[in-house]
Image (spheres, grey):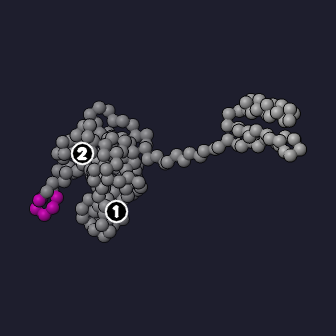
Amino acid sequence: MLGAAVGIVALERVADALPPGIVTRSAGADVDGELQPAERIPPTTTTTTVPPTTTTTLPPPPPGQIAFPIDAQPDCWISDNFGDCRGSGCSRLHEGLDIMGSKGADLYAVATGRLTTKYVATPGRTYGAGNGWTLYDEENDVVYKYFHMATHTPGLEEGDIVQFGDVIGTVGNTGTSGANSDTNYHLHFEYRPGNVAKDPRPLLVRPANCTFYG
């Protein structure tokens, strides 16, 4: 029995010297008084899944300007159509700016804020907002609207908070833009400080890939 006790003490000293995470179970004696081999239990390994990010490296705009909301490709262009007549007999005015872009190009949140309204296109309908978002920047009391998108970023829902530069959808032609055609891909973009429509064109950062007409 003395030999068994000495063996147990020795094994405990070995266990104390092992690296963290390696666990040993003390040896015991069998019916003949012989020590049983120690059982080593390997450390537990944990696998962490990192969710995909939708955040870009969109640079912050200079003070007083608005970040460009589209991943601009060489076919990007903008006319000066804020305030143009819309509807029968000019029954309403165009309260946004149309930014022509590549089909499926990323659309960025130009401010940190809450997605307060999600617009979903009705298949075949050629009027209305189509797919889109209303983004509210509460800190600065500014509303931004994105209409005619192809898709919403998967996982984003009404009420979610997005960060500046997050991808919130892609360029499309749903709604009034022309849902039954394979042309006219653009973003209808509204800038509404105090929820009053203002022309965003003078404030937009101008990427090298996009031509401004007018």
Residue of label 2: 143
Q: Is residue 126 visible?
A: yes
Res. 174 image quadrant: bottom left
Considering every residue shown, the one lying at the far bottom of the view is 124
Say left or right for 93 vs 55: left
Image point (76%, 38%), residue name: 26
Foreground: disc 2 or disc 1:
2
Secondary element type, mark 1: loop
Q: Nearer the N terminus, badge 2 or badge 1?
A: 2
Say left or right for 161 vs 84: right
Query: Image height check: is 135 above or below 132?
Result: above
Q: Which residues are magenta?
A: 86-91
The picture places residue 77, in percent across and down from the top left corner, at 32, 50
Q: Nearer the viewer, residue 46 or 54?
A: 46
Q: Is residue 130 magenta?
A: no
Q: How many marks?
A: 2
The kind of residue tagged 1 is Thr
Q: Nearer the viewer, residue 206 or 13?
A: 13
The picture places residue 114, in percent across and down from the top left corner, at 30, 46
The kind of residue tagged 2 is Val
Q: Nearer the viewer, residue 7 or 205?
A: 7
Image point (40%, 40%), residue name: 58
Say left or right for 182 vs 27: left
Q: Nearer the viewer, residue 128 or 153?
A: 153
The picture places residue 39, in percent across and down from the top left corner, at 76, 43
Residue of label 1: 183
The picture places residue 194, in percent across and down from the top left corner, at 18, 42
Question: What whole-number distance in Å separates the C-alpha atoms at marks 2 and 1?
Answer: 28 Å
Res. 154 image quadrant: bottom left
